[in-house]
Structure formats: C-alpha cells, structure tokens
Amino acid sequence: MRTLTIIVSVLALATFAACKKDAKQNDHNVRAGILPNGSALPGVISTNVELVANGTYYLNGKTYVKPGGNLIINAGVTVKGIPQFTPAEASALIVTRGGLIHAVGTLENPIVFTSNSNFPAVGDWGGIVILGDAPTNKFEPVIEGIDLPTLPIGVDVHYGGADATDSSGVLKFIRIEWAGASVSDNNELNSLTLGGVGSRTVLDYIQASYGRDDSFEFFGGTVNATHLVSLSTNDDILDFDLGYTGTVQYVLGVRKQGFVYADANGIESDNDASGSADIPKTQPSVSNITIIGRETAAFPGTLYAARFRRNSGMNVTNAVFLGYGMGIQVVSSTVFSGNVIHAFSALGPVPAGNEAHLNPVNSNTDIQLIDPFGSPFDPNTTLPAHAGKGCDPDYSYWFLTWTAGL
C-alpha cells in the first residue's frame, strides 16, 4: 500500500455536508480529507478520501475514483446505494484505470455495500466496478453498464493495457448486497465487475448476495481472487471474458428459492462474444470451489454448473458441482480434472479423472455433502471421501447472511 497522507482542512470539512437517507450527490471534485460519517460519496474522487471506521455513507448516483484518487474505507463502514429512477442512472462505485481503492474490513467487522431501501430488492443499486491496466484481448474496451453520455468531464471508463502487475488496491472482507443493474442486453453492472485488473490488486474474502446479473465478472486482466462467496445471484456466479488469465481459489456459490434466475450458470467463460482466437486467451485457473444449486430439481432459469464456450480455455481442479440441470460444457483447451459433479438431466462430456453422477431425483444422494441446502449454510460440507475438493475447509471466514423467507 502506498503511504497515505491524510489532510483534514477546514475547507474539506465544510465541503462534506452530512446527509441522511435523502442524501444529495456532491457535484464537484473532492479535496484530500476525511469524509464525515453520514455523508454522500462525491461524484469524482481525485485525491485521498477516507471513510471513518464504522461510519455509514451513501452512493447517490455514481462515484468515480480517477487517477491520483485513493478511496480508503475502514473496517465496519456501511455504504448504502440509493435506488435511482432508471438502471442507467444506478448508484455505483467505479474505480477507474489509475485510481485506487483500499477497503479492508475484518471477519468481525466487514465492510458492507448494500441498498438504502427499507425493503431491499435485487438490483437496487449498481455495485462495484474496478478498472485496471492489465492485458485484455481487445484494444481499449469500455466497461459494460455505464451510460457514457452521463460521464463527468475527464472521467474515462476504458480499461486494459500492458501492465500485468498493475495494482488497483485492496478489497478484503467485503459484503456486496442487492447490487447490479441491467442498462440493456449485454450491458450490465454486476455485484463486482473487474476490467483489466492487475495481479498486485488484492481480492480476498468477498461475498456478493442477492445480485442482478453476475456475482463476479472478470473482463481480461491478471488479478487473483480468493475466498469468494456468492449467495443467490440472478445470473452467473463466476463469469470470465476478454482474456482473463488469473487464478481463483476457494469459492462457495449457493442458490436459494425466492429469486428469479436468468440463464444462470455456476461458471461461464468466453474468450469473447464472437469466440475469436484473440490473445491473451481467456484461460483462468479455478480450484477448490463448491457450486450448489437445488436439491431435487434444477431451479428454473439455471443452465450449466460450469460452461466453457466460445474458444475459452480453463483449468478447473478440486471442485464440487451439484444441483444444476446440466453438468458441464467444455471446449478442447479446457483442463478439467479431479472434480466431483452432479447433474439432473445431462452431465455433458466429462473427461476422465473426474467423479460424475447423473441423478434426476436428488443432487446430493451420491455426493453426500452435509446439509448443503440449509439456511444458514452448514459449513461442514465435505466428507472424507472428497477430502481436498471443494472450498476451503477452514470456514471461519464465511460471513453468509440470509433474508427471512428466502
């Protein structure tokens, strides 16, 4: 982490008026300083701005962290996204290429991004977007989900570049709830969207709950991510595209009744939308993950437990998949080994070296995890027969939250 110089001035304190639930977005760039508890995040951050520990803050529209800006979020902070009139205006936090975020919570005191509504719903606000300078297989792509005519002057939402070791900062012990926004077909914000993010960025212990579109989408880049949790996202749990080549390890993805799922996969991966051979080729390494669908029949709107298509590559090991109608769809460059997989209707071409079960009645009869469909999720999921497979056996970091009736 860079050395941070925090300057608290009379001017800064006067600039940040406290706001309640009817917070109004500040329209100007922010000078360095500590943002008082109860404030709205400004529209543009171009220097150091710190949110005080255990404070409550608001996103009312979009906040962009520009090059030279560093948003510092201390443990216990809650950031509430205020619902907007249209998805194109959705409140969201966007760290642009060259900007930084340092959001470090703890297991006991995580940082929570959630809806400001008293009755939260899927897609109430837009989520978090991080853009970096690491390679993608397209030249200067623009991130999805941003209505370009509304960009403030001087804000750039292109991403990608030549620096594979680029750093956009740290996200650790973060919970993202009720996020995502669909501006139009194939133009969506996710709970966490990553574009060209480099390998020195730290992503660890992040949970995405009740989101519209994907929980975690990686557009190119080399960033590594560990200890990810997805709870009842509307679409895919993990989505890879545009030449992503990082490593993802220790993932738990759970779906519950009470949500509408839309063409949802456990994992979806493409080299790009056209299936080109452009390089770098999408080729992430994914290991120690547990993807759980439904116990007795696939959720309507769900597709594959894992779908690798459109010239995508993938290395998947020590994973457990169950409760989807279809098992896996693979392409020739996918390495899929040492995994356990169930499907209700069709397994797909499961390569040798995997344990596969086609059971149209019950997804867990053959795999025998311990109460994978309970609320809350039972952490004792993996029996000795599957030792070393699935998510991290040390479940002390999972901070799953559940909503009554779901």
Image: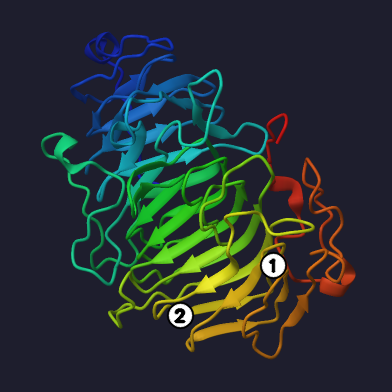
Marks 1 and 2, how far apart at CA? 19 Å
Q: Amino acid at mark 2?
A: Gly
Q: Are marks 1 and 2 in contact (CB under 8 Å)?
A: no
Q: Nearer the viewer, residue 342 or 22?
A: 342
The picture places residue 348, in percent across and down from the top left corner, at 62, 81
Q: Is residue 377 above or below residue 305?
A: above
Q: Please tell me whether residue 218 is drawn above or below residue 146 in the rendered image.
A: below
Q: Nearer the viewer, residue 112 or 278?
A: 278
Provide residue 236's location: percent of width, then percent of height: 52, 57
Q: Is residue 273 left or right of residue 360?
A: left
Q: Residue at x 49, y 89 (%)?
A: 332
Please identify the quarter of the rendering in which residue 298 is found. Answer: bottom right
Quarter of the picture holding the C terminus: top right
Left or right: 128 as drawn, with respect to 31? right
Residue located 42% across and 78% down the image: 312
Q: Give percent across and percent down for residue 346.
A: 67, 76
* Lower position in the chain sequence, tag 1 or tag 2: 2
Element marked by disc 1? strand
**Tag 2: Cα neighbours inside 10 Å, few (<14), some, or many (≥20)?**
many
Q: Is residue 189 above or below residue 391?
A: above
Total tally of numbered discs in the picture: 2
Q: Which residue is mark 2?
A: 313
Classify mark 2: helix, strand or loop: loop
Residue 321, disc: 1
Closest to the camera, between mark 1 and mark 2, is 1
